[in-house]
Image (spheres, helix red, strand yellow):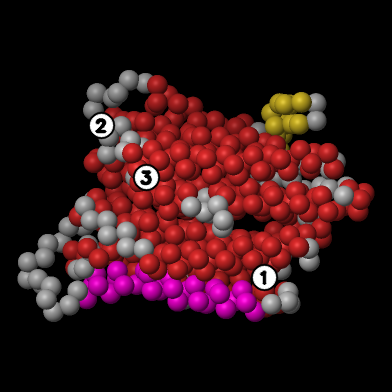
Amino acid sequence: MYLILLSIFFPVLAGTCLLIKKEAADRRSLLITTGICFVLTGVLVSATLLTAYGTGFTLFYLTQSLPVCFGVDAMSVIFSAMTMIIFLCAGFFSFEYMKHETKEKRYYGYYLIVFGVLNALCFAGNLITFYLFFEMLTLTSMPLVLHNGSREAIMAGLKYLFYSLCGAYAALFGIYFIHKYSDSLSFTAGGVLTSSAMTEHAGLLLIVAFVMILGFGVKAGMFPMHAWLPAAHPVAPAPASAVLSAVIVKAGILAIVRLVYYIFGVSFLQGSWVQTAWLVLTLTTVFMGSMLAYREKILKKRLAYSTVSQLSYILFGLAVMDAGSVTGGLLHVLAHGFIKSALFLCAGAIIYTTGKTRVDELRGIGKEMPLTMWCYTIVSLGLIGIPPTGGFVSKWYLATGSLHSSIPVFSWLGPVILLVSALLTAGYLLPLTIQGFFPGADYDYEHFKKREPSRLMTIPLVILTVLSVLVGLFPTPVIDYLTQIVSTIL
Protein backbone atom coordinates (compact mmCIF):
# COMPACT_ATOMS: atom_id res chain seq x y z
CA MET A 1 0.00 0.00 0.00
CA TYR A 2 2.63 2.52 1.07
CA LEU A 3 4.87 1.83 -1.92
CA ILE A 4 2.00 2.42 -4.35
CA LEU A 5 1.14 5.71 -2.67
CA LEU A 6 4.78 6.79 -2.53
CA SER A 7 5.34 6.04 -6.22
CA ILE A 8 2.33 8.26 -7.01
CA PHE A 9 2.56 11.10 -4.53
CA PHE A 10 6.33 11.48 -4.09
CA PRO A 11 6.92 12.82 -7.63
CA VAL A 12 3.74 14.92 -7.39
CA LEU A 13 4.88 16.50 -4.12
CA ALA A 14 8.47 16.89 -5.36
CA GLY A 15 7.24 18.60 -8.52
CA THR A 16 4.94 20.88 -6.53
CA CYS A 17 7.83 21.87 -4.25
CA LEU A 18 9.92 22.74 -7.30
CA LEU A 19 7.13 24.94 -8.62
CA ILE A 20 6.68 26.94 -5.42
CA LYS A 21 10.29 27.20 -4.23
CA LYS A 22 12.47 30.15 -5.11
CA GLU A 23 14.82 29.97 -8.04
CA ALA A 24 17.99 28.07 -7.18
CA ALA A 25 21.16 30.08 -6.78
CA ASP A 26 22.70 28.16 -9.65
CA ARG A 27 21.52 25.71 -12.27
CA ARG A 28 23.64 22.87 -10.90
CA SER A 29 21.71 22.67 -7.62
CA LEU A 30 18.40 22.54 -9.55
CA LEU A 31 19.65 19.66 -11.70
CA ILE A 32 21.01 17.73 -8.70
CA THR A 33 17.71 18.09 -6.84
CA THR A 34 15.68 17.10 -9.88
CA GLY A 35 17.99 14.17 -10.70
CA ILE A 36 17.64 12.81 -7.15
CA CYS A 37 13.84 13.05 -7.50
CA PHE A 38 13.99 11.17 -10.82
CA VAL A 39 16.10 8.38 -9.34
CA LEU A 40 14.01 8.05 -6.18
CA THR A 41 10.81 7.88 -8.20
CA GLY A 42 12.33 5.19 -10.39
CA VAL A 43 13.37 3.21 -7.30
CA LEU A 44 9.88 3.56 -5.79
CA VAL A 45 8.16 2.39 -8.98
CA SER A 46 10.55 -0.55 -9.35
CA ALA A 47 10.00 -1.57 -5.72
CA THR A 48 6.24 -1.29 -6.19
CA LEU A 49 6.27 -3.54 -9.24
CA LEU A 50 8.47 -6.11 -7.49
CA THR A 51 6.78 -6.24 -4.09
CA ALA A 52 3.21 -4.97 -4.45
CA TYR A 53 2.08 -7.11 -7.40
CA GLY A 54 -1.40 -8.50 -6.83
CA THR A 55 -2.19 -6.15 -3.96
CA GLY A 56 -4.80 -3.40 -3.80
CA PHE A 57 -6.45 -1.05 -1.34
CA THR A 58 -9.10 1.69 -1.08
CA LEU A 59 -7.78 5.15 -0.27
CA PHE A 60 -11.14 6.83 0.42
CA TYR A 61 -14.72 6.99 -0.88
CA LEU A 62 -16.08 9.75 -3.11
CA THR A 63 -19.56 8.44 -2.32
CA GLN A 64 -20.76 5.29 -0.58
CA SER A 65 -20.48 3.38 -3.87
CA LEU A 66 -17.50 5.12 -5.49
CA PRO A 67 -14.18 4.16 -3.90
CA VAL A 68 -10.88 5.69 -4.99
CA CYS A 69 -8.66 2.63 -5.01
CA PHE A 70 -5.31 1.44 -6.33
CA GLY A 71 -3.71 -1.89 -7.11
CA VAL A 72 -0.96 -3.54 -9.15
CA ASP A 73 -1.93 -6.13 -11.75
CA ALA A 74 -0.23 -7.53 -14.84
CA MET A 75 -1.44 -4.71 -17.09
CA SER A 76 -0.12 -2.15 -14.59
CA VAL A 77 3.34 -3.67 -14.85
CA ILE A 78 3.58 -3.22 -18.64
CA PHE A 79 2.56 0.42 -18.73
CA SER A 80 4.30 1.44 -15.51
CA ALA A 81 7.64 -0.12 -16.44
CA MET A 82 7.57 1.55 -19.85
CA THR A 83 6.63 4.90 -18.29
CA MET A 84 9.45 4.71 -15.76
CA ILE A 85 12.17 3.89 -18.31
CA ILE A 86 11.13 6.55 -20.82
CA PHE A 87 10.58 9.26 -18.21
CA LEU A 88 14.01 8.67 -16.73
CA CYS A 89 15.75 8.67 -20.12
CA ALA A 90 13.94 11.78 -21.36
CA GLY A 91 14.41 13.46 -17.97
CA PHE A 92 18.18 13.12 -17.94
CA PHE A 93 18.31 14.07 -21.64
CA SER A 94 16.52 17.30 -20.74
CA PHE A 95 19.32 18.35 -18.34
CA GLU A 96 21.40 19.25 -21.37
CA TYR A 97 18.61 20.12 -23.81
CA MET A 98 16.86 22.60 -21.52
CA LYS A 99 19.95 24.81 -21.37
CA HIS A 100 18.56 26.78 -24.29
CA GLU A 101 15.03 26.98 -22.84
CA THR A 102 13.77 29.36 -20.16
CA LYS A 103 11.89 28.55 -16.94
CA GLU A 104 13.61 25.21 -16.33
CA LYS A 105 12.33 24.97 -12.75
CA ARG A 106 8.75 25.14 -13.95
CA TYR A 107 9.44 22.52 -16.62
CA TYR A 108 10.96 20.01 -14.19
CA GLY A 109 8.18 20.66 -11.67
CA TYR A 110 5.41 19.77 -14.09
CA TYR A 111 7.49 16.92 -15.53
CA LEU A 112 7.67 15.27 -12.10
CA ILE A 113 3.97 15.87 -11.43
CA VAL A 114 3.04 14.22 -14.74
CA PHE A 115 5.29 11.28 -13.82
CA GLY A 116 3.31 10.75 -10.61
CA VAL A 117 -0.07 11.15 -12.32
CA LEU A 118 0.88 8.55 -14.93
CA ASN A 119 1.86 6.16 -12.14
CA ALA A 120 -1.59 6.74 -10.62
CA LEU A 121 -3.21 5.86 -13.95
CA CYS A 122 -1.18 2.65 -14.17
CA PHE A 123 -2.13 1.63 -10.61
CA ALA A 124 -5.77 2.79 -10.69
CA GLY A 125 -8.00 0.01 -9.34
CA ASN A 126 -11.32 1.05 -10.84
CA LEU A 127 -12.81 3.22 -13.56
CA ILE A 128 -13.65 6.25 -11.43
CA THR A 129 -10.11 6.42 -10.03
CA PHE A 130 -8.76 6.14 -13.55
CA TYR A 131 -11.04 8.92 -14.77
CA LEU A 132 -9.96 11.31 -12.00
CA PHE A 133 -6.29 10.96 -12.87
CA PHE A 134 -7.01 10.89 -16.61
CA GLU A 135 -8.43 14.41 -16.28
CA MET A 136 -5.52 15.42 -14.05
CA LEU A 137 -3.07 14.18 -16.68
CA THR A 138 -4.46 16.66 -19.20
CA LEU A 139 -4.25 19.59 -16.79
CA THR A 140 -0.73 18.81 -15.59
CA SER A 141 0.77 17.96 -18.99
CA MET A 142 -0.62 21.02 -20.80
CA PRO A 143 2.13 23.30 -19.33
CA LEU A 144 4.71 21.06 -21.03
CA VAL A 145 3.08 21.81 -24.38
CA LEU A 146 2.91 25.59 -23.94
CA HIS A 147 6.27 25.83 -22.13
CA ASN A 148 7.98 28.34 -24.42
CA GLY A 149 5.04 30.76 -24.19
CA SER A 150 4.88 31.57 -27.91
CA ARG A 151 1.53 32.22 -29.55
CA GLU A 152 1.85 28.94 -31.44
CA ALA A 153 2.56 27.05 -28.22
CA ILE A 154 -0.38 28.64 -26.39
CA MET A 155 -2.77 27.81 -29.23
CA ALA A 156 -1.45 24.24 -29.36
CA GLY A 157 -1.88 23.92 -25.58
CA LEU A 158 -5.46 25.18 -25.77
CA LYS A 159 -6.18 22.78 -28.62
CA TYR A 160 -4.77 19.91 -26.57
CA LEU A 161 -6.89 20.99 -23.59
CA PHE A 162 -10.10 21.34 -25.61
CA TYR A 163 -9.75 18.01 -27.40
CA SER A 164 -8.74 16.14 -24.25
CA LEU A 165 -11.55 17.55 -22.12
CA CYS A 166 -14.13 16.75 -24.80
CA GLY A 167 -12.86 13.19 -24.92
CA ALA A 168 -12.85 12.85 -21.15
CA TYR A 169 -16.41 14.17 -20.88
CA ALA A 170 -17.54 11.59 -23.44
CA ALA A 171 -15.98 8.95 -21.17
CA LEU A 172 -17.68 10.44 -18.12
CA PHE A 173 -21.02 10.22 -19.93
CA GLY A 174 -20.46 6.49 -20.26
CA ILE A 175 -19.37 6.03 -16.66
CA TYR A 176 -22.81 7.13 -15.48
CA PHE A 177 -24.44 4.28 -17.40
CA ILE A 178 -21.83 1.70 -16.44
CA HIS A 179 -22.33 2.57 -12.80
CA LYS A 180 -26.05 1.99 -13.23
CA TYR A 181 -25.83 -1.31 -15.10
CA SER A 182 -22.89 -3.01 -13.37
CA ASP A 183 -22.13 -4.46 -9.96
CA SER A 184 -19.01 -2.28 -9.56
CA LEU A 185 -16.54 -0.12 -11.47
CA SER A 186 -13.56 -2.31 -10.52
CA PHE A 187 -11.33 -3.62 -13.28
CA THR A 188 -12.36 -7.26 -13.62
CA ALA A 189 -11.17 -9.51 -16.45
CA GLY A 190 -14.19 -10.38 -18.58
CA GLY A 191 -16.23 -7.30 -17.64
CA VAL A 192 -18.50 -6.05 -14.88
CA LEU A 193 -21.86 -5.56 -16.63
CA THR A 194 -24.74 -7.56 -15.19
CA SER A 195 -26.18 -10.29 -17.41
CA SER A 196 -29.65 -8.71 -17.25
CA ALA A 197 -28.28 -5.35 -18.43
CA MET A 198 -26.46 -6.94 -21.35
CA THR A 199 -29.71 -8.62 -22.37
CA GLU A 200 -32.27 -5.89 -21.74
CA HIS A 201 -30.18 -2.78 -22.56
CA ALA A 202 -27.72 -4.11 -25.14
CA GLY A 203 -28.46 -1.36 -27.69
CA LEU A 204 -27.91 1.46 -25.21
CA LEU A 205 -24.76 -0.08 -23.76
CA LEU A 206 -23.26 -0.53 -27.23
CA ILE A 207 -23.78 3.17 -27.89
CA VAL A 208 -22.17 3.93 -24.53
CA ALA A 209 -19.21 1.70 -25.37
CA PHE A 210 -18.66 3.40 -28.72
CA VAL A 211 -18.89 6.91 -27.26
CA MET A 212 -16.36 5.98 -24.57
CA ILE A 213 -13.96 4.43 -27.08
CA LEU A 214 -14.14 7.65 -29.11
CA GLY A 215 -13.63 9.71 -25.94
CA PHE A 216 -10.61 7.84 -24.67
CA GLY A 217 -9.35 7.55 -28.26
CA VAL A 218 -8.82 11.33 -28.33
CA LYS A 219 -5.78 10.98 -26.08
CA ALA A 220 -4.53 8.16 -28.33
CA GLY A 221 -4.85 10.33 -31.45
CA MET A 222 -7.55 8.24 -33.13
CA PHE A 223 -9.40 9.75 -36.10
CA PRO A 224 -11.41 12.00 -36.14
CA MET A 225 -10.02 13.67 -32.95
CA HIS A 226 -6.32 13.41 -33.79
CA ALA A 227 -5.51 17.00 -34.77
CA TRP A 228 -4.13 18.03 -31.36
CA LEU A 229 -1.12 15.72 -31.73
CA PRO A 230 0.64 17.38 -34.72
CA ALA A 231 -0.14 20.77 -33.18
CA ALA A 232 1.26 20.01 -29.71
CA HIS A 233 4.41 18.03 -30.46
CA PRO A 234 6.38 20.50 -32.58
CA VAL A 235 6.04 23.37 -30.08
CA ALA A 236 6.88 21.42 -26.92
CA PRO A 237 10.52 20.94 -25.85
CA ALA A 238 11.89 17.75 -27.43
CA PRO A 239 12.04 15.75 -24.14
CA ALA A 240 8.41 16.71 -23.49
CA SER A 241 7.53 15.64 -27.04
CA ALA A 242 9.21 12.31 -26.34
CA VAL A 243 7.07 11.57 -23.29
CA LEU A 244 3.96 12.99 -24.95
CA SER A 245 4.37 10.74 -27.96
CA ALA A 246 5.66 7.63 -26.22
CA VAL A 247 3.86 7.65 -22.85
CA ILE A 248 1.15 10.27 -22.32
CA VAL A 249 -0.77 9.22 -25.43
CA LYS A 250 -0.61 5.65 -24.11
CA ALA A 251 -2.96 6.77 -21.33
CA GLY A 252 -5.63 6.63 -24.03
CA ILE A 253 -4.51 3.13 -24.98
CA LEU A 254 -4.56 1.96 -21.35
CA ALA A 255 -8.01 3.52 -20.91
CA ILE A 256 -9.40 1.59 -23.88
CA VAL A 257 -7.78 -1.65 -22.70
CA ARG A 258 -9.41 -1.24 -19.29
CA LEU A 259 -12.73 -0.26 -20.84
CA VAL A 260 -13.01 -3.01 -23.46
CA TYR A 261 -11.42 -5.92 -21.63
CA TYR A 262 -12.11 -5.15 -17.97
CA ILE A 263 -15.43 -3.25 -18.00
CA PHE A 264 -17.54 -4.27 -21.03
CA GLY A 265 -15.85 -7.58 -21.80
CA VAL A 266 -15.00 -9.16 -25.15
CA SER A 267 -18.08 -11.40 -25.17
CA PHE A 268 -20.35 -8.33 -25.24
CA LEU A 269 -18.51 -6.31 -27.93
CA GLN A 270 -17.16 -9.00 -30.26
CA GLY A 271 -19.11 -9.20 -33.50
CA SER A 272 -21.09 -6.04 -32.75
CA TRP A 273 -21.35 -2.87 -34.84
CA VAL A 274 -19.08 -1.22 -32.28
CA GLN A 275 -16.23 -3.55 -33.21
CA THR A 276 -16.80 -2.91 -36.92
CA ALA A 277 -16.91 0.87 -36.54
CA TRP A 278 -13.84 0.79 -34.31
CA LEU A 279 -11.90 -1.27 -36.87
CA VAL A 280 -12.82 1.22 -39.60
CA LEU A 281 -11.56 4.14 -37.51
CA THR A 282 -8.28 2.43 -36.57
CA LEU A 283 -7.38 1.47 -40.14
CA THR A 284 -8.37 4.91 -41.40
CA THR A 285 -6.06 6.45 -38.80
CA VAL A 286 -3.17 4.11 -39.66
CA PHE A 287 -3.27 5.01 -43.34
CA MET A 288 -4.08 8.70 -42.90
CA GLY A 289 -1.35 9.26 -40.30
CA SER A 290 1.26 7.61 -42.51
CA MET A 291 0.26 9.67 -45.55
CA LEU A 292 0.34 12.94 -43.61
CA ALA A 293 3.75 12.05 -42.14
CA TYR A 294 5.06 11.22 -45.62
CA ARG A 295 4.08 14.68 -46.89
CA GLU A 296 5.30 16.66 -43.85
CA LYS A 297 8.63 18.54 -44.07
CA ILE A 298 9.10 19.63 -40.44
CA LEU A 299 10.86 16.80 -38.58
CA LYS A 300 9.01 16.90 -35.23
CA LYS A 301 5.64 17.34 -36.94
CA ARG A 302 6.45 14.38 -39.20
CA LEU A 303 7.14 12.29 -36.12
CA ALA A 304 3.87 13.49 -34.56
CA TYR A 305 1.83 12.31 -37.56
CA SER A 306 3.77 9.06 -37.32
CA THR A 307 2.57 8.69 -33.73
CA VAL A 308 -1.04 9.12 -34.90
CA SER A 309 -0.54 6.20 -37.28
CA GLN A 310 1.45 3.92 -34.98
CA LEU A 311 -0.93 4.26 -32.03
CA SER A 312 -3.73 2.97 -34.21
CA TYR A 313 -1.64 -0.13 -34.94
CA ILE A 314 -2.15 -0.86 -31.24
CA LEU A 315 -5.83 0.06 -31.33
CA PHE A 316 -6.34 -2.15 -34.38
CA GLY A 317 -4.86 -5.12 -32.52
CA LEU A 318 -7.15 -4.44 -29.57
CA ALA A 319 -10.19 -4.04 -31.84
CA VAL A 320 -9.63 -7.38 -33.60
CA MET A 321 -9.99 -9.07 -30.18
CA ASP A 322 -7.95 -12.12 -31.18
CA ALA A 323 -5.30 -13.51 -28.83
CA GLY A 324 -2.50 -12.93 -31.35
CA SER A 325 -3.58 -9.42 -32.30
CA VAL A 326 -4.01 -8.31 -28.67
CA THR A 327 -0.58 -9.74 -27.82
CA GLY A 328 0.87 -7.84 -30.79
CA GLY A 329 -0.87 -4.64 -29.73
CA LEU A 330 0.46 -4.82 -26.18
CA LEU A 331 3.96 -5.65 -27.45
CA HIS A 332 3.74 -2.64 -29.76
CA VAL A 333 2.99 -0.50 -26.69
CA LEU A 334 6.53 -1.28 -25.49
CA ALA A 335 8.24 -1.28 -28.89
CA HIS A 336 6.64 1.98 -29.99
CA GLY A 337 7.37 3.58 -26.62
CA PHE A 338 11.11 2.94 -26.85
CA ILE A 339 11.30 3.73 -30.57
CA LYS A 340 9.26 6.92 -30.66
CA SER A 341 10.87 8.41 -27.56
CA ALA A 342 14.28 7.75 -29.15
CA LEU A 343 13.17 9.37 -32.41
CA PHE A 344 11.98 12.54 -30.68
CA LEU A 345 15.17 12.69 -28.61
CA CYS A 346 17.18 12.33 -31.83
CA ALA A 347 15.18 15.23 -33.28
CA GLY A 348 15.87 17.19 -30.09
CA ALA A 349 19.60 16.48 -30.30
CA ILE A 350 19.65 17.68 -33.91
CA ILE A 351 17.68 20.85 -33.11
CA TYR A 352 19.83 21.57 -30.04
CA THR A 353 23.09 21.11 -31.96
CA THR A 354 22.24 22.62 -35.35
CA GLY A 355 19.11 24.71 -34.80
CA LYS A 356 17.56 23.10 -37.90
CA THR A 357 13.98 21.77 -37.82
CA ARG A 358 13.19 20.86 -41.43
CA VAL A 359 14.10 17.55 -43.04
CA ASP A 360 15.39 19.22 -46.22
CA GLU A 361 17.93 21.20 -44.16
CA LEU A 362 19.64 18.10 -42.76
CA ARG A 363 21.65 16.84 -45.71
CA GLY A 364 24.96 15.48 -44.39
CA ILE A 365 23.79 15.37 -40.76
CA GLY A 366 25.04 11.78 -40.49
CA LYS A 367 28.58 13.02 -41.11
CA GLU A 368 28.26 15.66 -38.41
CA MET A 369 26.35 13.62 -35.79
CA PRO A 370 27.07 9.93 -36.59
CA LEU A 371 26.08 8.43 -33.21
CA THR A 372 22.79 10.32 -33.10
CA MET A 373 21.96 9.36 -36.67
CA TRP A 374 22.87 5.70 -36.15
CA CYS A 375 20.44 5.63 -33.23
CA TYR A 376 17.86 7.35 -35.44
CA THR A 377 18.39 4.82 -38.22
CA ILE A 378 18.14 1.73 -36.00
CA VAL A 379 14.95 2.82 -34.28
CA SER A 380 13.51 3.91 -37.64
CA LEU A 381 13.99 0.36 -38.88
CA GLY A 382 12.09 -0.77 -35.81
CA LEU A 383 9.18 1.56 -36.55
CA ILE A 384 9.07 0.30 -40.13
CA GLY A 385 8.99 -3.26 -38.79
CA ILE A 386 12.31 -4.68 -39.97
CA PRO A 387 13.96 -7.47 -37.91
CA PRO A 388 15.61 -7.85 -35.48
CA THR A 389 13.76 -4.99 -33.80
CA GLY A 390 10.72 -5.15 -31.53
CA GLY A 391 8.61 -3.41 -34.16
CA PHE A 392 8.92 -6.42 -36.45
CA VAL A 393 7.75 -8.89 -33.80
CA SER A 394 4.78 -6.78 -32.69
CA LYS A 395 3.61 -6.21 -36.27
CA TRP A 396 4.01 -9.91 -37.03
CA TYR A 397 1.61 -10.73 -34.21
CA LEU A 398 -0.77 -7.98 -35.31
CA ALA A 399 -0.91 -9.29 -38.88
CA THR A 400 -1.15 -12.98 -38.03
CA GLY A 401 -3.72 -12.30 -35.32
CA SER A 402 -5.85 -10.37 -37.80
CA LEU A 403 -5.68 -13.19 -40.36
CA HIS A 404 -6.53 -15.74 -37.68
CA SER A 405 -9.59 -13.78 -36.52
CA SER A 406 -11.60 -14.53 -39.70
CA ILE A 407 -13.46 -11.22 -39.41
CA PRO A 408 -15.03 -10.59 -42.83
CA VAL A 409 -12.94 -8.16 -44.92
CA PHE A 410 -10.95 -6.81 -41.96
CA SER A 411 -9.01 -10.05 -41.42
CA TRP A 412 -7.13 -9.45 -44.72
CA LEU A 413 -7.61 -5.69 -45.10
CA GLY A 414 -5.83 -5.02 -41.81
CA PRO A 415 -2.52 -6.67 -42.81
CA VAL A 416 -2.68 -4.99 -46.23
CA ILE A 417 -3.02 -1.51 -44.70
CA LEU A 418 -0.30 -2.31 -42.14
CA LEU A 419 2.06 -3.24 -44.99
CA VAL A 420 1.21 -0.09 -46.97
CA SER A 421 1.76 1.96 -43.82
CA ALA A 422 5.13 0.26 -43.31
CA LEU A 423 6.19 1.29 -46.82
CA LEU A 424 5.09 4.87 -46.15
CA THR A 425 6.97 4.78 -42.83
CA ALA A 426 10.12 3.84 -44.70
CA GLY A 427 9.38 6.66 -47.12
CA TYR A 428 9.24 9.35 -44.43
CA LEU A 429 11.97 8.10 -42.07
CA LEU A 430 14.77 6.67 -44.21
CA PRO A 431 15.38 9.63 -46.57
CA LEU A 432 16.87 11.51 -43.61
CA THR A 433 19.27 8.61 -43.05
CA ILE A 434 20.18 8.32 -46.73
CA GLN A 435 20.73 12.05 -47.22
CA GLY A 436 22.41 12.27 -43.83
CA PHE A 437 25.09 9.65 -44.50
CA PHE A 438 25.25 9.99 -48.31
CA PRO A 439 24.76 13.71 -49.00
CA GLY A 440 26.00 13.58 -52.59
CA ALA A 441 29.04 14.69 -54.55
CA ASP A 442 28.46 18.40 -54.00
CA TYR A 443 28.67 18.09 -50.19
CA ASP A 444 31.77 19.65 -48.61
CA TYR A 445 33.37 16.47 -47.28
CA GLU A 446 36.60 18.21 -46.29
CA HIS A 447 35.21 20.90 -44.01
CA PHE A 448 32.28 19.34 -42.21
CA LYS A 449 32.53 19.44 -38.43
CA LYS A 450 31.55 16.65 -36.07
CA ARG A 451 29.37 18.07 -33.31
CA GLU A 452 27.84 15.24 -31.34
CA PRO A 453 25.86 16.39 -28.26
CA SER A 454 27.01 15.65 -24.72
CA ARG A 455 26.72 12.29 -23.00
CA LEU A 456 23.67 13.47 -21.06
CA MET A 457 21.91 13.38 -24.43
CA THR A 458 23.61 10.47 -26.18
CA ILE A 459 23.46 7.92 -23.33
CA PRO A 460 19.63 8.02 -23.05
CA LEU A 461 19.48 7.72 -26.85
CA VAL A 462 21.68 4.64 -26.83
CA ILE A 463 19.71 3.03 -23.97
CA LEU A 464 16.39 3.45 -25.77
CA THR A 465 17.88 2.21 -29.05
CA VAL A 466 19.30 -0.89 -27.37
CA LEU A 467 15.97 -1.60 -25.67
CA SER A 468 14.11 -1.35 -28.99
CA VAL A 469 16.45 -3.99 -30.42
CA LEU A 470 16.43 -6.25 -27.35
CA VAL A 471 12.63 -6.47 -27.48
CA GLY A 472 13.06 -7.89 -30.99
CA LEU A 473 16.07 -10.13 -30.32
CA PHE A 474 14.73 -11.67 -27.12
CA PRO A 475 10.93 -11.31 -27.31
CA THR A 476 10.03 -14.65 -25.72
CA PRO A 477 9.92 -13.59 -22.03
CA VAL A 478 7.80 -10.54 -22.86
CA ILE A 479 5.51 -12.49 -25.19
CA ASP A 480 5.04 -15.24 -22.62
CA TYR A 481 4.08 -12.62 -20.05
CA LEU A 482 1.68 -10.91 -22.45
CA THR A 483 0.17 -14.26 -23.49
CA GLN A 484 -0.71 -14.98 -19.87
CA ILE A 485 -2.44 -11.60 -19.59
CA VAL A 486 -4.35 -12.09 -22.84
CA SER A 487 -5.53 -15.55 -21.79
CA THR A 488 -7.22 -14.03 -18.73
CA ILE A 489 -9.04 -11.20 -20.54
CA LEU A 490 -10.29 -13.02 -23.65
Name the amino acid type tagged 1.
Answer: Gly
Identify the element where label 3 is drawn: loop
Q: CA distance from mark 3 to mark 2?
A: 21 Å
Q: Residue at x 35, y 46 (%)?
A: 235
Name the amino acid type tagged 3.
Answer: Ala
Instruction: Out of 278 and 74, give the one closest to the viewer.
Output: 278
Residue hosting label 3: 236
Q: Residue at x 62, y 48 (%)?
A: 216
- Examine the image and state in which quarter residue 31 appears: top left
Q: Is residue 329 visible?
A: no
Residue hosting label 1: 324
Q: Magenta residues, as a range?
A: 412-438
Residue hosting label 2: 27
Name the amino acid type tagged 2.
Answer: Arg
Q: Is residue 38 magenta?
A: no
Q: Picture coordinates of residue 17 (x, y %)?
A: 42, 24
Instruction: Out of 395 and 195, give the one closest to the viewer.
Output: 195
Q: Are marks 2 and 1 in contact (CB under 8 Å)?
A: no
